[in-house]
Image (tube, rainbow, N blue to C red):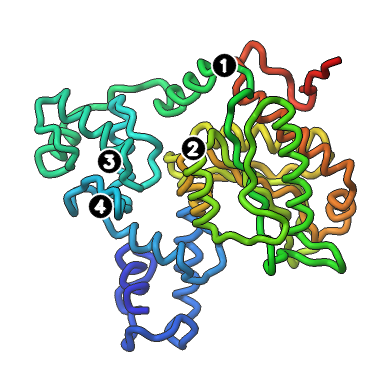
Amino acid sequence: MADVHAALRSLGLLPQDTSLDGADQPLDSAEYDDATELAVRHFQQVRGLSVDGRVGEETYRALSEARWSLGDRLLRYDPERPMRGDDVTNLQERLLELGYDAGRADGILGPETETGLRAFQRDYGLTSDGTCGPATLRALRQLGRKVTGGRPQLLRQSASFVESGPHLIGRRIVVDPGHGGSDTGFTEGETTESDLVFDLASRIEGRLAAAGATVYLTRGRSQNPEPAERTAFANDARADLFISLHMDAHDSEHARGVASYYYGTGSGASSTVGEEFAQLVRREVVARTGLLDLGSHPKTWDALRMTRMPAVRLDCGYLSHPVDRLLLLDARVRSAIAHAVLAAVQRLYLPAEADPPTGTFQLPTHA
């Protein structure tokens, strides 16, 4: 617990005298007081995590990563244990601003970041060793931004998608039905979230396959893979898109509607195509079902961050709300959501001049 307090103090979220003696105490001990919980909630909000005030695995890892600033350590690619931290994010953002393709700024030093770093070093007469040390850091700080007038990664990725053609034949899409097995998610009588999202995933699978895509589901009806297994499955499949399906629940009687999420920190770093797809799929679902629109939001959840392709989580409504639940129990509404996902995927690959208005795309029928 002492390291959590230290991290929060270093970020200015706790005063210096908040630290208490007794390291290694459990998180539910007396030292995890109201001030600490408030600080954790603030950190989670800023970092795009689930705001629950608990220091779980993702929050603890994010606190550890937040302590690194660019220049604190040598940065190099390690395929066995990739370096993670805010310093890696800053390096990626700097390379992208200078016009080098370093992948998305996700704070994980992978092969794309190493390639971008080596290219920068080579162009500026440095030793092209893929290590960000003092000399490379000085060069990065001395140079002004080269790419202006927009987000360079958005321009690069959008162009790549359009150039790949409008068809879905050969596209690899992984659909991830949330929960599964003994983890049923929200349950109301005989209705379980896991069964409904699996049914929805199966409908999406059928429509995308009919359009020519190769579709994989991350689980069967009775399986419940770990989150890391789901993202690893998508990465191993070399998927073009990853779509995670959920239905929400909340204690508030007013909670209802459709929301989508994409990888992003809220401060500029994001999956640009993921953001575009999150907005497309949410608007298509709203247009075809009449469910309330709750917007698209950046999050740093591992399911969005660890996938190496554009990834979106779609929360299709609140099973805890009587109106949403009634709609989601209707097979026709689930079919409409599946068609909305197909429309959004198709629109993602269309050039702007051929993109149909929201809610109007129809899958061509063949005699």
Classify mark 4: helix, strand or loop.
loop
Q: Amino acid at mark 3?
A: Leu
Residue 172 lies, with reference to residue 293, above or below; the image says above
Label 2, on which residue? 238
Q: Which mark is residue 69?
A: 4
When asked about the image quadrant of residue 133, the answer is: top left
Q: Residue 181 at x, y = what percent? A: 69, 64
Q: Amino acid at mark 2?
A: Arg
Label 1, on which residue? 165
Q: Which mark is residue 341?
A: none
Residue 203 lies, with reference to residue 42, above or below; the image says above
Q: Is there a contact, CB below 8 Å, between mark 3 and mark 4?
A: no
Closer to the chain start, of discs 3 and 4, is: 4
Closer to the observer: label 2 or label 1? 2
- Marks 3 and 2, Cα distance to the nearest angstrom? 25 Å
Closer to the observer: label 3 or label 2? 2
Q: Is there a contact, CB below 8 Å, between mark 2 and mark 4?
A: no
Closer to the chain start, of discs 2 and 4, is: 4
- Marks 3 and 4, Cα distance to the nearest angstrom? 10 Å
